[in-house]
Amino acid sequence: MIDLITKKLSGKKVVLLGFGREGQSSFKVIRKALPSKPLIIADKDASIRLHPLVSNDPFVEFRTGENYLENLNEYDLIIKSPGIALHRLSYQIPSYKITSQTDLFLQQYSSQVIGITGTKGKSTSASLIYHILKLSPQDLVLLGNIGRPSFNCLDDLTDSTVIVFELSSHQLEYLTKAPHISVLLNIYQEHLDAYDSYRDYQLAKMNIAKYQEKGDFFIYNADNPIIAEHLGVLDLQRSYKEFSFKKKVDNGCFITNDHIVYSEDGKEENVYDLRLKRKLKGDHNVMNIMAVINVCKTLRVPNDLIVEGISTFRGLEHRLEFVGQFRGIDFYNDSIATIPEASIEAVKSLQNVDTIILGGFDRGIDYSGIARFLGTSNIRNFIFMGEAGKRMKVEIEKVASPSQNLFLINKFDEFLEPALKYTKAGEVCLLSPAAASYDEFLNFEMRGKRFKEIINENIRIDQSIS
């Protein structure tokens, strides 16, 4: 990687765009390769000038404040952090000027990478792949959007390391090299505030396949119409493996008689019995499991390890996570559900949801579909919050029955009073917002943690009184 960085940056005027966790890790690697390379660091936050990594570096200049994105075309190379959107600039930047830590990493290590993306399910699928592969002794790392910047792992890598890489649309947007094994779980409306259009978001996701080469493997959801539409246009020269809930596929995974079947070269084998106990509930997680099985079979992982891994995987925080029972009500935290499709799957998975908490930051997503689903469901109580919640409430009111109760709260912490008053004992109160969190919270994790804090605090109070 040091040689690649030296080659890419030498003789160029370079700006490091964004100095959060990923920007800092990029800076460390650049300094290891080029200790005296002049660099510009651009970030809205002026306090980065005081960061100990850069405060005493004589070869660093800063562009900070509200205008930090001005005149980016004066640079030869822009190393962009994922959290910075360029779609609202008043000028165009040639794409060849823009790279990222992810793209540089894949230029060096793509042949060792299993890359996973999708609007929903990528963290669960990446973690499950990692969990299964850990059952066999091998050199393995898990990194990327799941919380560990790729450059932080460079010292852990050898030529034989298997790299499981969770990839967001922001990381994929300016890609020029894709993983050897690429997984595309699904594409739904999401992050519309960060793109000029839904189509631009789709194209960013499709880069995980577009920049693969002959001999690579592309694993994808054969039931997703958006993916099918793009594959009809792209002329991709690589091996395909599909997974489908709806149909039999010739190469990949499908379902027959409560079993996940894997098909390859005209041969079929039962790999996983869906009647076995597992933590991953719901049809959406069955799709994730099929994607993971495709990866494992590509790597020739034995079936017994695949079954063991699926059965012992505990799931991730904020994803249909059972919080506890309070006054006879089961509380579930599904704060990760930031789009309607995820919330619909959560309701299907739990089945006995009596109360659902919806809403948050409004990104202009279409809520008519989830309104039709919820308004004709057995859910009796709806608690709405934020601007997105207000829009959902209007949509659900159009189809709701007189027996359904709709409540609008002013802030998140107010959810508990109507939940306790109206939810039947023995049934579920589900936080599955179908909206982003950053009206009240920095991210969905903070929203989920606050939900759990409120429930657990009240459980402790009840226990102390009794």
Image (cartoon, rainbow, N blue to C red):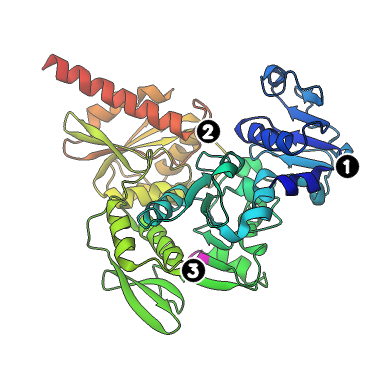
- Describe residue 450's horizontal placement relative to residue 195 as left or right: left
Percent coordinates x, y for residue 187 in the rendering = 54, 56
Q: Secondary structure at mark 1?
A: loop
- Residue ID for mark 1: 11
The residue indicated by pointer 3 is: 222
Is residue 348 among the parts visible in the rendering? yes
What's the distance in space between the residues labelled 1 and 3, CA to CA?
46 Å
The amino acid pointed to by label 2 is Phe
Q: Amino acid at mark 1?
A: Gly
Q: Earlier in the sequence, mark 3 or mark 2?
A: 3
- Callout 2 secondary element: loop
Residue at screen point 43% across, 30% down: 447
> Image quarter for residue 414?
top left
Q: Which residue is mark 2?
A: 361
Residue ranking furthest to the top: 465
In percent of width and height, residue 195 lies at 67, 45
Quarter holding residue 155: top right
Q: Do the residues under discs 1 and 3 have CB atoms within 8 angstroms?
A: no
Q: Residue at x 67, y 24 (%)?
A: 53
Q: Secondary structure at mark 3?
A: loop
Q: Is residue 349 left or right of residue 206?
A: left
Mark toward the start of the polypeptide (1 vs 2): 1
- The single residue placed furthest to the bottom in the displayed view is 266
Which portion, as a residue range, is magenta? 219-224
